[in-house]
Amino acid sequence: MSEDGQNLPNHQRFPSATPLVKELEHVLDSCRMELNHVDEVWPNLYLGDILIAHDKEELRKLGITHVLNAAHSTWESKGDQAFYGQEIHYCGIAAEDSTDFNLREHFYPASDTIHLCFSFSGKILVHCVVGKSRSATLVLAYLMIYHHFSLTDAVQRVIQHRAISPNRGFLKQLHDLDVELRDRTNLCELL
């Protein structure tokens, strides 16, 4: 690949800076993967929908020890700690899949929850209703915060395993996180 990305197909070209929301949407739209109920998008990190989240037997087969529900308290979601019992640790975020919803305030707490699961050698399911927008946004934020992925790299990594489609508002919040993390890294390099 050339430094300016010119030998990449059009849908994979990004400037060195944080990509614009419309560029991200173009890449996300190019993913033609069939949507499954659950996919492992990072070792021991599963991204899925509400159907898999409500299937305790399938969760047991997958070895899921933690569930992070990004659609907690919605009418579709019956999950809570009482539903999962002692075998699965539950964390719920009452997020709306709305471009106006501030999911960014949950980026660090959700990322900490995912990271904590791994510190106990666990497996985590991050889900919402469809497993494409709210939960995918939290997984992208986790990869950016804990694994120092750029937003571009995080998106490319996840869409290798699952079709995702965060709404425009969430993409803008991820864009802002990417800028913040890049600025922090650049500042540390100067010191």
Image (cartoon, rainbow, N blue to C red):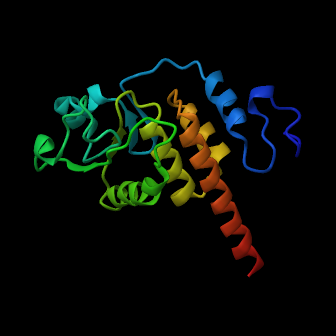
Quarter of the image where the N terminus is located: top right
Residue at the image position 66 percent from the left and 69 percent from the top: 184
Residue at the image position 46 percent from the left and 31 percent from the top: 132
Q: Nearest the camera: 122 or 127? A: 127
Q: Horizontal and vertical percent for residue 23?
A: 72, 34
Residue 63 lies left or right of residue 150; in this view the side is left
For the question of whether residue 119 can be seen, the reply is yes
Residue that protrudes farthest toward the front in the picture = 100
Q: Is residue 93 above or below residue 186?
A: above
For the question of whether residue 9 can be seen, the reply is no
Q: Nearest the camera: 11 or 107? A: 107
Quarter of the image where the C terminus is located: bottom right
Residue at the image position 58 percent from the left and 35 percent from the top: 168
Q: Is residue 144 above or below residue 169?
A: below
Residue 62 lies left or right of residue 172; in this view the side is left
Q: How many numbered callouts?
A: 0
Q: Horizontal and vertical percent for residue 112?
A: 40, 61
Residue that protrudes farthest toward the bottom in the picture = 191
Q: Horizontal and vertical percent for residue 58?
A: 23, 29
Give the quadrant of residue 32.
top right
Residue 155 lies left or right of residue 127; in this view the side is right
Q: Horizontal and vertical percent for residue 76?
A: 25, 28
Residue at the image position 53 percent from the left and 45 percent from the top: 140
